[in-house]
Image: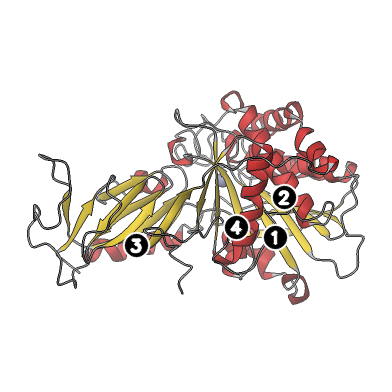
Amino acid sequence: MNGRYLLLDLVRTDAPEGAQSTVLGTHTLWWFDGQSTRMPRTAGDPGFCAAPAGSDHWQQVSGRLYLVVQAGTSFLTDFPQVPVVLDAGRQLVVDLDGPTEEQVLERVAANPACYGAVPLPAGGAVRKVLPPKARRGGLPELVEELAATVDVSRLRADVEYLSSLYTRLSVHPGYQTAAAWAARKLRSAGYRVSTPLITVGSGRSANVVAEKPGSGPDAKLVYVTAHLDSVNHRDGSAAPAPGADDNASGSAGVLEIARLLAGKDNKHDLRLVLFGGEEQGLHGSTQLVAALPTADRDRIAGVINMDMIGSRNGDGPASVMLEGGQVSVPVMNLLADCAHQHTDLEVETSLNPYASDHVPFINAGLPAVLTIEGADSSNHAIHTGNDTAEKIDEGLMRDIVAMNVVATAHLCGIIGEPPEGKPRRGQGSSPVIARGPGVLDVFGAG
Ligand SMILES: [Zn+2]
């Protein structure tokens, strides 16, 4: 695939003849593949170059283009030698050639909690910013109540407690302390709690699972999840790992949703899970999914995962990224609707799921969605001793939890389906998979 040319053009909306395109948020990458007969022969080919006078957007690529999804800046940190064609934060487009390609892909596959890579998909939007929507009036009282009663002081207190433990490394006693504390809280909120053991390499850890059976017949199953463990990759396993944003914030979100839904009548079964072993390779979620009986798999209505929901990164508007697979689109639509109804969050979507506990569910064909702070790759504190509670943005955490608690209440039948955001099967009409000139969803076609 040597000799492929690129036109990186952030302005034009019309395709150069014969070019492929990939949209990443506000960026559009136009590119030619090495097989194309229309590929420009020189970098400045006037037949194709629509760049402003004097600038030259063409780049030659020596290898093959890959789309990388990274947690934080993990890929950039671990592979400084790999040429980055486009840095769009959580998503990157990189150029892998020859022996590097094999080595990098091997290491990427061995670290599913850090990053993932696929050949660059052509013809669609890898990441999209959804247009804001006007709020509807006359929502049921319970919906407004749930969104309005998310308690930032409880969220903050839980983040402060969890991040005050020296570390919550999955195989460390600090993790057991955190898990026992969370189990007590969930039990006292009225949930049936278990702590199934998991393996993390040669070590052992545990998930915390809280259940509230549904009151209706033919109950579906809804999961709300977060990983409870923390890690300090920079300074090693003996160093402090406060993990306030990653992921005391998401864990606090699970506990808050547990409290808010405790006294409500859920028609469908609700399970809240705090995972261990996420940072070592999604062990807790992988083992939970592997152990799911077929009868449970077949009735899962949605999995909402929270991982890093408390850091405002950069100067942009407060934003949330909804990340799932094709199977997750109905739940992503619901979440986007809830965000627009109850918060001022900017909503971005991606159909390239990587690097958190939603992945094992999606790999098993289950509709899981990661909800994560926008621009998470600009958060340089994660996986270090600097991921501390005072950096947490209460408003962002509250808004993401408000979106998630209302969506959970819809999914488990506490409130009816919203008129517009109800989970839908199929494509075409959904706001996430909008098709239009120049914007085709990558995975919608096949
Ligand atoms: Zn995390």
Of tags 2 and 3, the one toward the viewer is 2
- Tell me which numbered mark, 2 or 3, is placed earlier along the sequence: 3
Q: Which residue is mark 1?
A: 302
Task: Give the Cα distance between marks 2 and 4.
Answer: 16 Å
Judged left or right of residue 69, residue 287 is right
Q: Which residue is mark 4?
A: 358
Q: State if disc 2 and disc 1 touch (CB < 8 Å).
A: yes
Q: Position of residue 338 (x, y in %)?
A: 68, 46
- Tell me which numbered mark, 4 or 1, is placed earlier along the sequence: 1
Q: Is mark 3 within 8 Å of ligand 1?
A: no
Query: Can you say whether 376 is above or below 267 in the image?
Result: above
Q: Position of residue 141 (x, y in %)?
A: 85, 40
Question: What amino acid is found at the position of numbered circle 3 in the picture?
Answer: Leu
Q: Which residue is mark 3?
A: 120
Task: Give the Cα distance between marks 1 and 3.
Answer: 28 Å
Q: Position of residue 161 (x, y in %)?
A: 71, 30
Question: What amino acid is found at the position of numbered circle 1 in the picture?
Answer: Gly
Q: Which residue is mark 2?
A: 407
Q: State if disc 3 and disc 1 touch (CB < 8 Å).
A: no
